[in-house]
Amino acid sequence: MDEPSMTSSPTAAPGPPTPPVPLAELLAREELGLRRIAGPADADLLWVHTSEMADPYPYLLGGELLLSAGVLLTDPDHYVGRLVEAGAAALGFGVRPVHETVPAALIEACDRQGLPLLEVGPETPFTTIARAVWRLMAEARHRELRRVTRAQQALATAAARPDPVAAVLHQLATQLGGRAVLLTARGQEVHAAGRRPAPEAAGALTRLARVVARERPGSPASATDAHGGTHLSAYALGGGEGLVLALATRQRESGDHTVAGIAVVLLSLLAAPHQGADAAGRSAALVRMLLGASPAEVAPLLGSAGPWTVIHARRTDGAPVDALTAGALGASLGTALVDAERGPGDAVRLLLGPDPEPARPTARPDETAPDPARPGDTAAQPARPTARPGETAPGPARPTPRPGWTLGASAPTPVTALAAADAVAARALAHARATRAPLTVDAPSGGLAALVPPEQAAAHARALLAPLTVPLADTLRCWLSLHGSWDRTAVALGVHRNTVRQRIGRCGELLAVDLDDMDVRTELWFALRQT
């Protein structure tokens, strides 16, 4: 295996302004009348240069098509050796007026040292050849820009999908015609797309990824290598956990590095929620809250009293969700508090904190503020001193629908009521799935229900619903929220519609009420909203 080529920063070394032009494309221009008479057929032209010096080596950069009439040519073998040493791509030798034909010694030297030699007829000026090469370079550059633009659009579209990390890797593998893998610093595969390379090449790719994994200071940003005809490259993603994008392709085309760079930026942004410095502590706060820790333990880790919104989410197509995909959803909603590791088939749970944008000026403790729900009402309302005098209070963040996802959200709630909000969010998600709505947000009690003191309402609800078991109460709540629809309730609960009928019938028997009566339904709904 060749030694890997590494780049320590995103800024690459200066290179040609345009993609290289294959020698065959130049020879295909019949109007030039060029003929290859020695050396290999394959070469990439980066520049065109004319020189009649006996030794042009000091003035070559490498990759040139050198044009010469051989004015000072005395030692063809030494002359060709110096061109090869300088990295020239090909030699164009013009016949007449200095030489009637291309010297045989020059032809032999080019064949022996592997330098393509072109015969330039007297009717073809060197400037015409240079103009043709620049035109071909401009065409190649235009093709590269179109390819990169199409790839950028395709990758950006993939990044907007419900599973953005997997979608970006799949699109990248398609654009490059190879294998795209997201690896951890230890070489563990997180996501992959495209055809698998040979086992030896796959192992070399994993080793190359470790070179750029940012586990130690001074690690390069990217590295390239080759193994058995397979081109390998690795790019470090931004963040602190050493994620690496690794690529294996059968060929390397102009623009591949740019396309890979676009993918690196997108994947760094998508993976960022899992790499923040405070992600571990904040995620621990979410886990502890959902596992039943007391608010006193959770509040210091969350860093805010709220209001907080609990969100439950599932893919609309029912596909499983991994941590990176769930993290991308959290990023789109503006939170790093994501729980996607409860088990297969479980909903993703997110905790959305207060909106960092100020909601409104906060009244001083001795003042009153108008109710924001009624902008035209000038009646005084009790002030809510959630900030110090003169400051603005953060308002609750508002969840919005996400393409490809079904969301259920609780109403904004203080940190002391997060456990109850978690159950509310689960019911909201079930309602959203049953009604095929992208988002259902549980609304806090208002109107007439808000006039009853909470303690009295809760006591009445407990007494009224006492005969019901938890499954029966959940079924009744779901059935009432869906306006008595058997089918939608069955979908929301994941049971057969006959099971729903049996449970609702049992509820009517235990409560000794007629569930077809609207007054009964209203009172039960009021009671269920208190639990």
Image: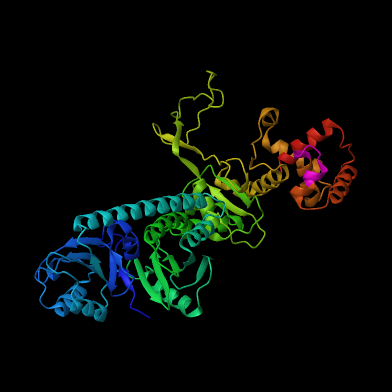
Residue 147 in the image, given as x and y percentages of width and height: 42, 53
The residue nearer to you, when weighing 374 against 201, is 201
Quarter of image, res 450: top right
The residue nearer to you, when weighing 458 against 145, is 145
Residue 442 in the image, given as x and y percentages of width and height: 65, 40
Quarter of image, res 529: top right
Left or right of 57 in this view: 266: right
- Rendered residue at 56%/41% (across/down): 400
Residue 286 in the image, given as x and y percentages of width and height: 55, 55
Quarter of image, res 513: top right
Look at the image and give the residue range highlighted in magenta: 480-489
Q: Is residue 515 above or below residue 227?
A: above
Q: How many marks?
A: 0
Q: Is residue 125 magenta?
A: no
Q: Is residue 20 visible?
A: no
Query: Of helix, strand and loop, which mostly describes the magenta segment?
Result: helix
Residue 203 in the image, given as x and y percentages of width and height: 46, 78
The residue nearer to you, when weighing 250 against 375, is 250
The residue nearer to you, when weighing 22 against 287, is 22
Q: Please state, as top left, top right, bottom left or bottom right, where the C terminus lies in the image.
A: top right
The way the protein has been coloured in the rendering is rainbow
- Rendered residue at 29%/67% (across/down): 35
Q: Is residue 481 magenta?
A: yes
Q: Is residue 141 above or below residue 528?
A: below
